[in-house]
Image (spheres, coloured by chain):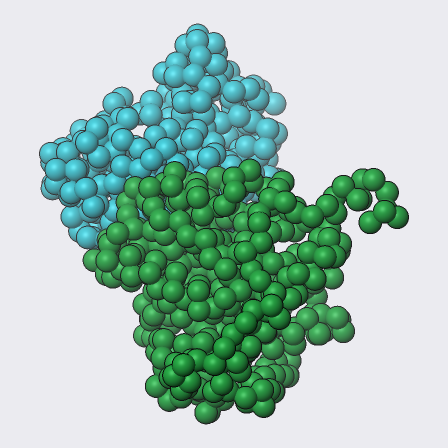
């Protein structure tokens, strides 16, 4: 850093705002499980399959972005443990509100991976039942959505994750983001309000980045949700950099989870690279919400792996040693190390899962590429009839 | 609890028509939920929901914290899953704190996703009472510029009742501008039968005339009618068009009238520059310019915030005398 001008050097100082909680995967000692059976690792195995699918999904679109086949991409790489584990904690009928780094939650919530890749998981799910309905069709439509095709959820009118998917017959209620970060927090709380009004035990979860905790909507929604005891879980994916702004310039408290105290609700900080830890926290939060005790604020500590969007230079602001540290805390590496070290799953099996996920993604995205473009002459109403 | 509206009434106060529309629709549809500041035990700043807590309970009549954006966002989310929220702004002016939820989340949701947001926001608006800068504004134009919203501006008790019930039944977000000056001054018949299911563009000719067309809404329609009465005694016949619904706009009725009278003026209480009068004037010029014998006139508030002093305020709001004066000028052209 000594060869840089003082201004740049200042902006590249290590980010002191939030202490790291994750360990590098290579430093983690994991020993064979005492009862080393597949069942003992069932939860992790189930989450890992979806994490791998999400990773391959992102890697594919990142590659397409680099080759110019896609005009914009926001990567979810590094967030998979948090997003997949969170989606594992909800069920059909719950509402899911996502951001642009939540492909893991979307894929986990939409798909039955065994229907797409038979045998990847045992027939009976360990954590949650997969969403009913046609996974293959949904996955293809999702790929079409990313590519702006007619068959996508917004028929090419909205970008990537800015869409909704409701399939009431299966209890699928997914609401995507608008670009104004934090704006969907009240909307998510509103779906929870609907459940409360209807006397249902369903819950809503919403992902935000740490940057959106600075918005008024964060405060307003969390406050109302707490006063009204809404069945709502707000998950902060704290990857410590909002576009190019480090946490030290975003907030002055030690932990965002501590803000829950001000709302009179539980706040939990968790290592967001550890799928099992996130699952445990989320299951507790969801159970609390279902029993009518109100919201929980979860702060999942992550690291920045990619630019704000692919192709921007925001990652230049993250010091190299910090970026390297995040790379060593890759949630997929952690999950795979645990599965292998546990003595049940081989590296060959892990590789096979990865190859099958990658093939599925490539085939689905290729098929989506061949699907029709939107009809530019088709009018689109601004009003519902 | 409310004015009995089970039969047609000849003299329902505007404010009672609003209360009755809310309570009748809440009785008709258990999914209707009210949210707003101080609306439960207190009955709201204008007492429109007085007695609602007792009849409908605290689950359906929700006091909210002072959080317009949070409240509107929660209303949006619940509307997407089957609730019919009606949010009361304590004063229309405060809606600026919830602006983003309205213009970017609610207004665009159907176009973006084909999921409707059946949301109503009630906005006690307008001046005339010396209530000061932040309790007197006319801000309908902030939202008329945003595709996807419906905007309602009743001038009469009957329209206030009918359009509020229709707004709640409509699957789209509706901004319902109710004029505070009319609350306890306007009194007219309310028809409670055959409530429409949707808000549709409507323009209504309140007085037929051959010499000039006026277009107005809310309180200004009453003042325009007073002006028309004065001018009639001078032999000038004004065709007075009221717009109970501003968006979607029924401009065909306006165009047809202007083609007949060949002169037009738009009267609104909101400020002039970039106001909705400019849009209506442009539509007249687009479609009826060859019929015009005079320029299209806008009679509006000057470009200033509302002042506190009643005299200062009164000097800015178009009066029947000023409307008469400006219409006479158009007829001299």
**What shade does chain B have?**
cyan
Give the camera-side residue of A124 and B186.
A124
Chain displayed in green:
A
Q: Residue drawn at (57%, 49%), measured in percent from left and top?
A: A19
The quadrant where residue A59 appears: bottom right
Locate the C terminus of chain A and report the quarter of the image it occupies. bottom left
Q: Is residue A321 above or below residue A364?
A: above
Q: Is residue A342 above or below residue A352?
A: above
The number of discs equals 0
Q: Residue drawn at (25%, 46%), measured in percent from left and top?
A: B33
Q: x, y (%) of residue B100?
A: 50, 43
Q: x, y (%) of residue A374?
A: 60, 72
Give the camera-side residue of B96 and A350.
A350
Q: Is residue B323 left or right of residue A197?
A: right
Q: Is residue A79 left or right of residue A385?
A: right
The quadrant where residue B55 appears: top left
Q: Is residue A51 left or right of residue A172?
A: right
Q: Residue drawn at (41%, 77%), measured in percent from left and top?
A: A43
Q: x, y (%) of residue A143?
A: 57, 76
Q: Residue drawn at (25%, 61%), measured in percent from left and top?
A: A201
The quadrant where residue A9 appears: top right
Quick check: can you spot residue A254? yes
Q: Is residue B59 left or right of residue B149?
A: left
Quick check: can you spot residue B197? no
Q: x, y (%) of residue A344?
A: 47, 87
Q: Is residue A355 above or below residue A234?
A: below
């Amino acid at each position: 850093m000594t060869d840089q001008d003082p201004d740049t050097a200042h902006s590249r100082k290590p980010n002191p705002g939030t202490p790291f909680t994750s360990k590098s995967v290579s430093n983690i000692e994991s020993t064979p499980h005492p009862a080393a059976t597949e069942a003992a690792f069932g939860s992790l195995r189930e989450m890992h399959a979806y994490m791998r699918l999400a990773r391959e999904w992102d890697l594919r679109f990142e590659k397409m972005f680099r080759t110019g086949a896609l005009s914009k991409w926001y990567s979810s790489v590094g967030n998979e443990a948090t997003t997949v584990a969170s989606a594992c904690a909800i069920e059909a009928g719950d509402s899911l509100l996502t951001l642009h780094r939540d492909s893991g939650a979307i894929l986990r919530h939409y798909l039955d991976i065994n229907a797409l890749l038979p045998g990847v998981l045992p027939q009976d799910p360990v954590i949650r039942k997969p969403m009913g309905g046609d996974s293959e069709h949904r996955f293809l439509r999702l790929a079409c959505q990313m590519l702006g095709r007619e068959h996508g959820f917004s028929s090419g009118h909205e970008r990537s994750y800015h869409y909704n998917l409701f399939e009431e017959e299966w209890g699928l209620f997914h609401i995507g983001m608008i670009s104004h970060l934090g704006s969907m927090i009240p909307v998510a709380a509103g779906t929870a309000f609907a459940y409360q009004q209807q006397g249902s035990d369903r819950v809503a979860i919403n992902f935000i980045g740490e940057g959106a905790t600075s918005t008024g909507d964060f405060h307003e929604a969390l406050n109302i949700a707490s006063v009204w005891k809404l069945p709502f879980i707000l998950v902060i994916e704290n990857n410590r950099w909002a576009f190019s702004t480090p946490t030290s310039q975003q907030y002055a408290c030690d932990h965002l989870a501590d803000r829950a105290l001000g709302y009179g609700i539980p706040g939990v900080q968790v290592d967001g690279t550890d799928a099992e830890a996130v699952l445990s926290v989320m299951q507790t939060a969801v159970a609390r919400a279902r029993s009518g005790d109100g919201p929980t604020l979860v702060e999942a500590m992550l690291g920045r792996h990619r630019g704000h969007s692919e192709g921007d230079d925001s990652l230049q602001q993250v010091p190299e040693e910090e970026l390297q540290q995040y790379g060593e805390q890759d949630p997929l590496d952690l999950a795979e190390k645990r599965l292998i070290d546990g003595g049940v799953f081989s590296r060959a099996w892990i590789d096979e899962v990865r190859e099958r996920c990658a093939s599925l993604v490539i085939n689905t995205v290729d098929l989506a590429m061949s699907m029709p473009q939107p009809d530019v002459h088709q009018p689109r109403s601004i009003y519902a009839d | 609890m409310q004015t009995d509206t089970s039969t047609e009434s000849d003299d329902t106060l505007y404010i009672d028509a609003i209360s009755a529309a809310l309570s009748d629709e809440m009785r008709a549809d258990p999914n209707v939920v009210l949210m707003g500041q101080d609306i439960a035990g207190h009955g709201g700043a204008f007492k429109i929901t007085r007695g609602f807590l007792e009849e409908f309970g605290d689950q359906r009549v929700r006091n909210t914290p002072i959080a317009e954006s949070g409240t509107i966002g929660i209303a949006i989310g619940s509307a997407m899953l089957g609730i019919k929220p009606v949010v009361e702004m304590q004063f229309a002016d405060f809606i600026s704190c919830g602006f983003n939820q309205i213009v970017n989340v609610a207004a665009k949701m159907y176009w973006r996703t084909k999921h409707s947001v059946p949301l109503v926001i009630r906005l006690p608006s307008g001046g005339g009472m010396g209530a000061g800068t932040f309790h007197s504004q006319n801000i309908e134009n902030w939202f008329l510029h945003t595709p996807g919203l419906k905007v309602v501006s009743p001038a009469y008790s009957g329209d206030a009742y009918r359009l509020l019930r229709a707004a709640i039944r409509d699957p789209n977000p509706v901004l319902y501008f109710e004029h505070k000056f009319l609350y306890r001054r306007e009194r007219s018949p309310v028809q409670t039968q055959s409530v429409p299911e949707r808000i549709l563009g409507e323009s209504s000719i309140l007085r037929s005339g051959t010499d000039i067309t006026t277009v107005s809404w809310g309180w200004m329609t009453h003042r325009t009618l007073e002006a028309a009465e004065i001018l009639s005694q001078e032999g000038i016949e004004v065709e007075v068009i009221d717009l109970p619904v501003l968006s979607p706009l029924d401009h065909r009725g306006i165009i047809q009238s202007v083609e007949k009278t060949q002169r037009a003026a738009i009267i609104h209480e909101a400020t002039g520059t970039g106001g909705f009068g400019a849009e209506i004037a442009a539509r007249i010029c687009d479609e009826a310019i060859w019929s015009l014998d005079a320029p299209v006139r806008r009679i509006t508030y000057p470009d200033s915030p509302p002042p506190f002093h009643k005299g200062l305020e009164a000097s800015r709001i178009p009066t029947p005398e000023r409307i008469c004066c400006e219409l006479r000028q158009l007829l001299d052209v």
